[in-house]
Image (tube, helix red, strand yellow):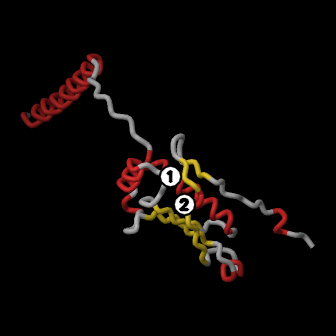
């Protein structure tokens, strides 16, 4: 008989979850809840708690500065509840550890996106050549339309 569990890879979550170059969140700040998952899995679905709900309290986090907390709450306001928590649910896999890894990864992507500062747009002027090309195209279009009206007028004359 083959032991199927021996082939499965056990994934572990590091002590600190890296969000970007400056920010790391301590694993102890993450709260995991487990429930029964829906979807494929046969008896597995009915017996095991493979669905993972990751809860991260942004307001109470010691890993984030006040500026970072403000930025996250502003950018992810639709995902944060009244208690100041972000909830990430994962039930893709039939394994609880894989769903846990997925939830942590998705939280990291969410937070990294919220903390990313966009570059300021630099105003640019159109070049002289581009202005000339635009005016030339407008002139050509104008001529085409003029020719249409002239021929239509001539045909109506006869």
Counting other residues with Cα less than 10 Å from the Cα at mark 1, is it few (<14), some (14-19), or many (20 or more)? some
Instruction: Using the image as rendered, state which of residue 80 and residue 25 is in the foreground.
Output: 25
What residue lies at 10% left-to-right and 34% top-to-bottom?
Answer: 153
**Image coordinates for residue 145, horizontal then vertical, percent:** 18, 31
The answer to whether residue 73 is above or below residue 36 is: above
Mark 2 Cα within 10 Å, few/some/many (few <14, many 20+)?
A: some
Q: Earlier in the sequence, mark 2 or mark 1?
A: 2
- Give the number of marks: 2
SS assignment at label 2: helix
Can you say which quadrant of the picture contains the N terminus? bottom right
Q: Position of residue 56 (x, y in %)?
A: 50, 62
Quarter of the image where the C terminus is located: top left
Instruction: Identify which residue is drawn at 66% across, 66% down.
Output: 93
Q: Nearer the viewer, residue 148 or 43?
A: 43
Q: What is the number of the mark on residue 63?
A: 1
Give the numbered dot on residue 29.
2
Expressed as whole percent of the image width and height from the top left, the position of residue 40 reads 65, 74
**CB-based contact (under 8 Å), mark 2 and mark 1:** yes
Q: Residue furthest left?
A: 157
Q: Residue at x 84, y 68 (%)?
A: 4
Q: Vertical placement of 84 versus 42: above or below?
A: above
């Amino acid at each position: 008989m083959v032991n199927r569990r021996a082939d499965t890879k056990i994934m572990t979550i590091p002590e600190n979850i890296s969000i970007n170059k400056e920010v790391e969140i301590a694993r102890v700040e993450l709260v995991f809840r487990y429930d029964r998952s829906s979807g494929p899995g046969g008896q597995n679905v009915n017996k095991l708690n493979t669905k993972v709900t990751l809860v991260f309290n942004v307001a109470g986090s010691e890993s984030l500065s006040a500026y970072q907390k403000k930025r996250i709450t502003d950018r992810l306001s639709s995902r944060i509840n009244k208690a100041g928590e972000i909830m990430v649910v994962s039930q893709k896999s039939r394994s609880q550890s894989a769903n846990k890894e997925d939830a942590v990864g998705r939280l990291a992507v969410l937070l990294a996106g919220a903390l990313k500062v966009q570059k300021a747009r630099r105003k640019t002027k159109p070049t002289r050549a581009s202005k000339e090309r635009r005016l030339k195209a407008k002139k050509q279009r104008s001529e085409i339309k003029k020719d249409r009206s002239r021929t239509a007028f001539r045909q109506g004359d006869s």
